[in-house]
């Protein structure tokens, strides 16, 4: 990476960290606090909304990129508009609770903007539909999984790193931007949480991950198989938890504390240990993705399916063990 590029990323990280500090002062002044509760994993009231710093850093970079590459200005502006929509509705929800239906509608509009870019890039309709579904899903997955210190932001960093490994060097810049923006926020949230992402941050992270997923497919020429691997930690926990709640006849759309990471913390493990374990899982996943690059699309599909199936079996085994542990408690 050129020195100028590295310096720009360093400045971006400093900007993100400074903005996180400012957002904490704002949250304290406005009393935007998440109190401990039955469905939460923290024990002290903590300010929320720090994810706005990541959003600001990314949008600032979008503006810079549009000036640097004006021929791509429309596409950059479209992605930025989607970020503003998702972050905006999250920001509003952090201040005053909004209905789930309204939030979902905004998420669907933002996903449509991203899918429109994929369609404009002459991708097959099934890829367009996949990106739309991925955007809506990942926005909500990152929101659901933002429940302990450092988990959502660190997993976004691992996803960005995984995508970067799948892309040629000239196309990695958006991945580094997200990684560095999250790195500026992370010290305020891990290992001790001085501020939470809030809906403004968690939803925006999910949308940005979906945008990088689409970038791998459209610009990187990747089949969608390997880019799914860096997302597997969150996709498996959120997906299997949702499926188990639906099969049990529970009100799956309501807030809960049944994700594996939440159960793990409730058995007495620290946020630090659980977040590190998810990070280790993601390192294995992105290493497998990297090793799978030389394979043809069929073998990549088989590799990805095998990984998700194996990880799903592991999730089920650990969940059953966790249930027994919680029963013993």
Image: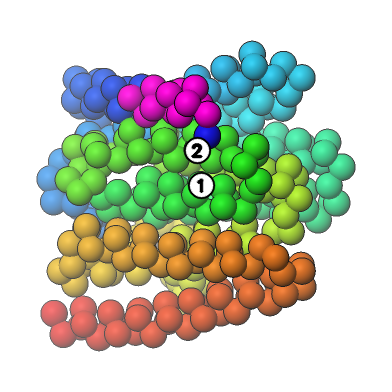
Which residues make up the magenta segment? Answer: 2-14
Numbered disc 1: secondary structure? helix
SS state under label 2: helix
Could you say which quadrant of the image residue 91 lies in? Answer: top left
Q: Quadrant of residue 192?
A: top left
Colour basis: rainbow
Depth order, front residue of 214/238: 214
Where's residue 49, x and y in %? 33, 32
Q: Residue at x 52, y 34 (%)?
A: 1
Q: Answer above or below: position of 295 versus 144.
A: below
Cα distance, mark 1 to mark 2? 7 Å
> In screen coordinates, is 324 left or right of 240?
left
The residue located at (43%, 47%) in the rendering is: 157
For mark 1, what is the residue? 160
Where is residue 88? Give x, y as percent: 49, 27
- The magenta stretch spans residue 124: no
- In the displayed structure, does residue 143 sit left or right of residue 78? left
4 inside magenta stretch: yes
């Amino acid at each position: 990476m050129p020195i100028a590029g590295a310096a720009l990323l360093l400045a971006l990280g400093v900007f993100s960290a400074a903005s996180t500090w400012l957002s904490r002062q704002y949250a304290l002044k406005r009393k935007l606090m998440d109190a401990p509760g039955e469905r939460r994993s923290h024990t002290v009231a903590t300010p929320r909304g720090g994810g706005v710093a990541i959003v600001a850093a990314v949008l600032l970079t979008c503006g810079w990129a549009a000036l640097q590459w004006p021929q791509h200005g429309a596409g950059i502006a479209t992605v930025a508009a989607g970020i503003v929509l998702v972050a905006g509705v999250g920001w509003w929800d952090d201040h005053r609770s909004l209905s789930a239906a309204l939030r979902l509608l905004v998420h669907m509009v933002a996903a449509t903007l991203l899918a429109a870019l994929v369609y404009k890039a002459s991708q097959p309709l099934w890829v367009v539909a996949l990106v739309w579904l991925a955007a809506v899903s990942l926005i909500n997955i990152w929101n659901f999984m933002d429940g302990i210190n450092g988990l959502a932001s660190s997993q976004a960093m691992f996803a960005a790193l995984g995508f970067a490994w799948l892309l040629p060097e000239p196309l990695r810049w958006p991945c580094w931007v997200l990684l560095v923006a999250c790195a500026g926020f992370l010290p305020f949230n891990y290992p001790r949480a001085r501020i939470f992402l809030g809906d403004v941050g968690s939803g925006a992270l999910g949308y940005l991950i979906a945008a990088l997923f689409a970038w791998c497919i459209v610009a990187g020429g990747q089949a969608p198989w390997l880019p799914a691997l860096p997302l597997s930690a969150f996709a498996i926990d959120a997906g299997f938890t949702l499926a188990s709640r639906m099969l049990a006849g529970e009100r799956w759309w309501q807030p809960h504390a049944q994700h594996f990471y939440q159960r793990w913390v409730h058995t007495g493990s620290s946020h630090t240990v659980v977040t590190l374990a998810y990070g280790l899982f993601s390192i294995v996943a992105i290493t497998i993705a990297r090793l799978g690059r030389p394979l043809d699309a069929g073998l990549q599909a088989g590799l990805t399916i095998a990984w998700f199936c194996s990880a799903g079996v592991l999730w089920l085994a650990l969940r059953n063990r966790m249930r027994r542990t919680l029963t013993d408690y």
